[in-house]
Amino acid sequence: MSNENVLLSIKDLHASVEEKNIIKGLNLEIKPGEVHAIMGPNGAGKSTLGYVLSGREGYEVDSGSVSLGGEDLFDMETEERARAGLFLAFQYPVEIPGVSNLEFLKASVDATREANGEEAITSADFLKQAKEACKKVNLPVSFLKRGVNEGFSGGEKKRNELMQMLLLKPKLCILDETDSGLDIDALQVVAEGVNSQRSDERSFIVVTHYQRLLDYIKPDYVHVLSDGKIVKSGDASLALELEAQGYSWLQTEPAEDELEG
Amino acid sequence: MTEQIDKALAREYEAGFVSEIESDTFEPGLNEDVIRRLSQIKGEPEWMLDWRLKAFRVWQEMEEPDWAHVDYPKIDFQAIAYYSAPKSMQDKPKSLDEVDPELLRTYEKLGIPLIEQQMLAGVAVDAVFDSVSVVTTFRDKLEEAGVIFCPISEALHKYPELVKQYLGSVVPTKDNYYAALNCAVFTDGSFVYIPKGTRCPMELSTYFRINEQNTGQFERTLIIADEGSYVSYLEGCTAPQRDENQLHAAVVELVAMDDAEIKYSTVQNWYPGDEEGKGGIYNFVTKRGICHTNAKISWTQVETGSAVTWKYPSCVLKGDNSVGEFYSVALTRGRQQADTGTKMIHLGKNTRSTIISKGISAGKSNNSYRGLVRMNPGAKGARNFTQCDSLLIGDQCGAHTFPYVESRNPSAIIEHEATTSKVSDEQMFLCQQRGLDPEKAVSMIVNGFCKEVFKELPMEFAVEAGKLLEISLEGSVG
């Protein structure tokens, strides 16, 4: 069934939250190394897609199939999907007081290593990698000792997410509206971090409402999600078109809250 | 989510085994004859017996307290046996070679090897099994430093003047119902004396084990730190898994003379009962220390066991500039109930106290913090800071805070902060999305919540406490 050259294959996916259908027949194929942008109005199901793929509780799959690297994604627990290389960068990263970033990140990295039959990384090696990652995302090294996201500003939280991505080296990164709440400087830092991670072995789904982020992260494909389905796909130029014309010309029926700005 | 956390919380009580040891145990029941027999077996001096009998008469006049936020059936004090000792201990073994190997195995199974070569360097242990002390390690080394560390029953013979002077000096017989009972029937416990200007060269530790059925454990600990001395003392405790409730009513007294410092740490892991609340230990304990001028007493406790806990380690800050500290983690799950906290009584000038309490409630448990901060008229310039945090796991448990503040000196400053939070779905999802299984996620979140208290524990113990929480939260997932 699965094509070796496909990392993620979504077939006719239907999913709901609190018994309300949100994803209504979504198809998407992503090959290794590709960057796909998913755009669309509020309420189109953009964030839901990320949660369904990563296995958040309360996000129910009604029908359809998804494979990641040839494996049935829905056969895996949330943490198994993560260890298999699926990474979700949160729109609003949550705080875990008292648990240091370093401790949290090492546990994450070790969980993935263990799943791959590798030994836990030594503390010294990990500290070295973590310090390098801090530098790349422009976070002071002192953040490693602070509680996970504890008292971080919005921008710092996003950079912290990026740092986790650098250390976990996932195969598929889903960036859920990473641009929200970022000023232009912070946006550039995040985009540079993402760009530095682009490779033949890593694919991205960049979920965003605005074209702005795509000035910095150039997608290979742009998809427009509306009412739970992909209604149009194209190359990077589609994003510019959307910027100029808005989403309404693509919508089959108006979304609840139309474009706000 | 709740289901996941519940799974993660389900656990086996690892210390729940019973040792096959032949014991001499009193018939259940309590009267003056029982106390006389107890005193006789221990070969106590006359004044000790009188002291016990006086306490017994006081206790009979007292009422069982009911103000704590806990609920349990009335205890039948006549159904409890008040003394139980392994037969092999009758001849008072002089060295480890003479100790019943089954007893040594019991402690080894609990992770407390009593063979000195296998022990953590730097920790001396007094092992108390039911009503007697089995062995106290590293005594020679401590004697060299002038430190006395021995069972209190032995101290009564060897150092009667010290015991007589300080026993009951911090917790008077009439203090409360369970303290009075303890005064009448206490069996064994540890005695510590640190001479003037001495820094105790090792950590001292007592490990309490209840083994026999239907017995109560009534231990008594007395620690005296003479002027300018320092000691760090740890206690741990476990009991077999049984369907009947068992009573543990201890009294601990600390005396910190001028410029002395006592650090007292507890990891309490008595059998908590099963998921439905059947069995488990009633842990009714009175702990108090007195601080003379410039002295400091620091209580740190990690409470994960017992069906019902009723415990308020306190400091009487009598001397000027003395310092009292209380750091507590109390975890309740299943049907456990804990009512715990502290009392800081400020008498002297410029006395200072700090209270950090972390309560974690899961399952259908109830966890209460109860604390008193009192500034007496003489407590000029005294200060207190209290921080009380509650963490709820699931939606069927309770967390309660009962702070009492009494200030009779206008120059005293009292601060109280309190928070209540939950292990949220978002936190669990973040952890799992980063590859952590739910068990690891819960234990990491809980450990993070407790960090401020764990850092106060001696190092060997901090690791142990972290592990204990992990075991407490470990479940059948996978």
Image (cartoon, coloured by chain):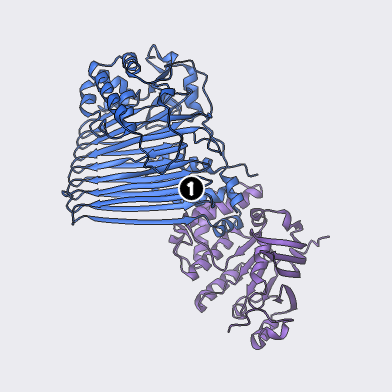
Say left or right for A217 vs B311: right
Look at mark 1 in the image and give the residue it sits on. Answer: B361
**Residue sitting farthest toward the top:** B91
Q: Amino acid at mark 1?
A: Ser
- Residue A93 drawn above or below residue B181: below
Instruction: Give percent across and percent down for residue B63.
Output: 33, 33
Q: Is residue B11 visible?
A: yes
Q: Colour of chain B?
A: blue
Quadrant of the snapshot with the C terminus of chain A: bottom right
Residue B69 spot, x, y in % from top left: 41, 44
Image hue for chain A:
purple
Q: Closer to the camera, B109 or B143?
A: B109
Q: How many marks?
A: 1
Q: Is residue B151 visible?
A: no
Residue A241 screen position, x and y as percent:
68, 86
Parent chain of label 1? B
